[in-house]
Image (cartoon, coloured by chain):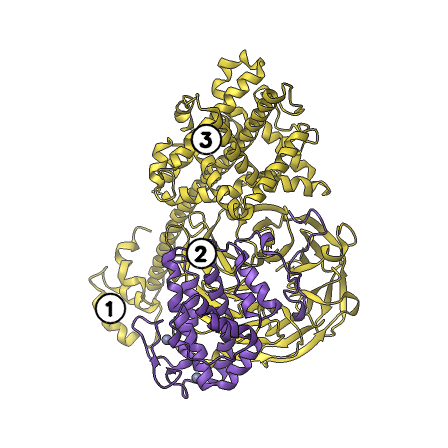
Amino acid sequence: MKMADGSTILRRNRPGTKAKNFNGWPDEPFEEMDSTLAVQQYIQQQIRKEPSNIELILTPPESQDEGVWKYEHLRQFCMELNGLAVRLQGECLPENCTQMTATEQWIFLCAAHKTPKECPAIDYTRHTLDGAACLLNSNKYFPSRVSIKDSSVTKLGSVCRRVYRIFSHAYFHHRNIFDEFENETFLCRRFTHFITKYNLMSKDNLIVPIVEGDAVGSGESEA
Amino acid sequence: MKIPVPCGGTTMEESSPSQNLNGQIGPCGGGINTGIKQSDESNQRIQYSIPGILHFIQHEWARFEMERTQWELDRAELQARIAFLQGERKGQENLKNDLVRRIKMLEYALKQERAKYHKLKYGTDLNQGDMKHPGFEEAVPETNTESEAPFSSVSNFTWKQGRQMLRQYLQEIGYTDTIIDVRSNRVRTLLGLNNNEEGPGSGGVNGNETGNKRASDSQGRRTPAKKAQPSNLVEAMMLDTEAAVMANFEFLSGADVDMEDEDGLEDDIDESGEVSDETIRPSSAAKRKANKALMLHEADDVDAEAEEVLNELNLLTQAEVPGGMTQGDPQDWIISTGSGAYSADSSKRGGGDDQVDSTLGLGELAQLTVNNEAEPAYDLPTTKESLRKTWSAKYTLRSHFDGVRALAFHPADPVLITASEDHTLKLWNLHKTVPAKKSASLDVEPLYTFRGHTGPVLCLTMSSSGEQCYSAATDGAIHAWAIPSFPLDPYDSYESSVLATKLTGHTDSVWRLVCHPQREHLLSSSADGTLKLWSTRTNSLVHTYSSEQDGIPTSCDFVRDESDKMVAAFTSGHCVVFDLETGKPVTRLESTQDIAVPEVGRHIYRAVCHPLLPITMTAHEDRHIRFYDNNTGEAVHSMVAHLDAVTSLAVDPNGLYLLSGSHDCSIRLWNLDSKTCVQEITAHRKKFDESIFDVAFHPTRPFIASAGADGLAKVLRLDPMLAPSQ
Ligand SMILES: [Zn+2]
Ligand SMILES: [Zn+2]
């Protein structure tokens, strides 16, 4: 349909596009997005614009269904956490990190198996992300990306809890990796803010002290 | 043949010639023991006796004879099967024809309704020049090429306008989201209609007795449909129906416009026009005799008929509500709608599945009319034909968080790897499935997730051995992965050895990777302006290629019919054939004409080489697929292939079919011989303005797959019912 008039912008990454121009198209207003993936498009567009502007990224468009909003954000978090997992793969070896721990208080059991298992930290990380990918793409719980059943929305909390442990392990055991990743993506800050805003985890479990950035500070106090 | 069988039978079957010799000495069966005793000594130095040799020959001859009869039996069986399949295909064809007929009929009814409405409102006749009741055209010859297709008629101004309005309306209510549902619903409705009144006309038109001989039984049942419907209900139905017709005619209408500049394709349109004339006939066939006199009062009669058609539709949609027509219980459906020829056929084989499959396939079939009708070899029962129309959606692979950019099949196993913008690759075993809720397709969960890239993964290729795969992302590094061996537990512990090595050299996004089918070579094309050839044995760089005048490479492929060449596509819109050893350009594949929008329009998304012929095929932003001769560099064919940019191409291993994917959300299968579309499937949804990134044929199994911006990969399988092996 859009082919008809040449003036329309086609938001495409054509083969041959340079990395710096990838997704480098002008913003599309949310009202004009007519795709079933509009919320994902919008979130990614906001992140690309300024990854540190957490307040803006987490502000839903008007009259946006909250279940879908939370769901799409969690998808985005799990996706970006791949980046942390890739970095951890190089350093978090099963010989050194035999268990998933953050502070020495708890050992986390990996829930991806039939009976929860004491997986090494790197396996815990991978299994948790794989499990989250399966759950969040499950035809049973999330058949649509436009509307989500309340019963499925409750599943998001447990995903958040498990996924958060990846941040905490990285922070307490691989601080250099964590910092490097965080400086680039602001992901842990955004995630903490997200969780507090939508009350997806008990605040006691948020053990990674986050830098009181400008955007984050306001979010913390309000929650 | 008769003599040796009882004697030789089992004992001799596996014995060596020397033992046969011995067996011959004693009387049949009983003497074997003594023979074997002797043989212990005589075996050492093999003694040939004339009777022994004779017996052996006799025995061998008997064996061959037996085998021959066996083969003959097999042959007869296979021939029977071929005949059966051919009959079935004809049945399918009739079904399709009939469906198309229904569509035209509806279209006609719509026009009548519109005329009536117009008349009521404005009191004048609507000027629809080409609107003729097809019932009058009993003498329309098959070769009539002058009659205009109603939907392409220029004079039909209001019709076009109305369509435009409808389109806008559809867009407003969320066209992209609803259209798929509307389509499938409507097609189901149409099919119901079709089964209900598999008219005698279809038998006449196609001359196929087996297909339709039972159809007339059900003919009588349809006429007494409730006639007195409240008019607003009819009007509501109108809208609905129009939506359905529009949905199904998206392709046709697109084709109209597209093909106008294509030489030699006008025939298609004409022929389809002819079809539309024929098609309405059967609907009135039953009543024609009685009404012949009344036919002159066109408006009244036509109104009644339109109403009847709409009532029928109505009836069917109502029936659909209690779920009688859901795919779940096709058996009920067959009974309740009377046994059309096709359902009778399929129930014979207990084939609830067949019914469902045909239901699913028809949405596409309906859209194929233009091309199919034009095909001259339409009725020739060649083996190629079995590929036609029979790919059906099998698996939806959902696990990626973002668009799937590339996919590659394992050379032998039913295994697929997908590469995504979510930075990961995932490995899927198509035979490890879990049944999905309330849908015909099965869910597959990934068996392994490859993590290593730090940017969107853009391309992927698998080595011909199936032991390695290579992927590359926006960071320019090519990752070589050792494919983990099967069986796999998705929640196994991490093996860092899976990421075997990285090939570094490119300084920007790598957009295309191709493994050489025979040699241990890998070809890459990157946004840094170069193409590189790598040795996959030593994991080292062999050669670098570039073309200053053509800009940045967008795609590449090894030339298949010659071992030392490759073809690369550039942002200039041209392809260049390079000599791999010297690195020199050999031929330029330039398309001199017919590129509409020069800058973006000529952008080549994908260039692939034919597996056997010196032909390169390119997929363009301007909706074209172009074919070039590698030796002369000339464009040998060019066609509008989709409604939007063509993004991906794949050729089947035998070089007979081409699969294309497009940002218009559909994949299309093309017969490379006739360059006609044999199947169209709507596969993915849009994210921004992108939809489908990649398509692939399995090298050895009947699978095809598509990768979408919606984060899904879809696998289609050749309908097992029609596959040669069953
Ligand atoms: Zn660790
Ligand atoms: Zn685990």
Q: Chain A rendered in what hue? A: purple
- Amino acid carrying label 1: it is Gly
- Amino acid carrying label 2: it is Tyr
Q: Name the residue tied to disc 1.
A: B35
Q: Chain letter of disc 2?
A: B
Give the mark nearer the N terminus: 1 vs 3: 1
Q: Chain letter of disc 3?
A: B
Task: Tell me whether the residue at label 1 lies in contact with that at label 3, contact meaning CB atoms closer than 8 angstroms.
Answer: no
The mark tally for this picture is: 3
Which quarter of the picture shows residue B314?
top left
Q: Name the residue tied to disc 2.
A: B395
Between the residue at mark 2 and the residue at mark 1, the CA separation in whole angstroms equals 62 Å
Foreground: disc 1 or disc 3: 3
Q: Is residue B536 above or below residue B289?
A: below
Mark 1, Cα crowd under 10 Å, few <14 / some 14-19 / many 20+, is some
Q: Chain letter of disc 1?
A: B
Does dot 1 land on a helix, a strand or a loop? helix
Q: Is residue B423 above or below residue B231?
A: below
- Amino acid carrying label 3: it is Leu
Q: Chain B rendered in what hue? A: yellow
Q: Nearer the viewer, residue B347 or A147?
A: A147
Q: Name the residue tied to disc 3.
A: B313
Task: Tell me whether the residue at label 2 lies in contact with that at label 3, contact meaning CB atoms closer than 8 angstroms.
Answer: no
Q: Is residue B488 visible?
A: no
In the image, residue B479 lies at what x, y percent? 56, 76
Give the mark nearer the N terminus: 2 vs 1: 1
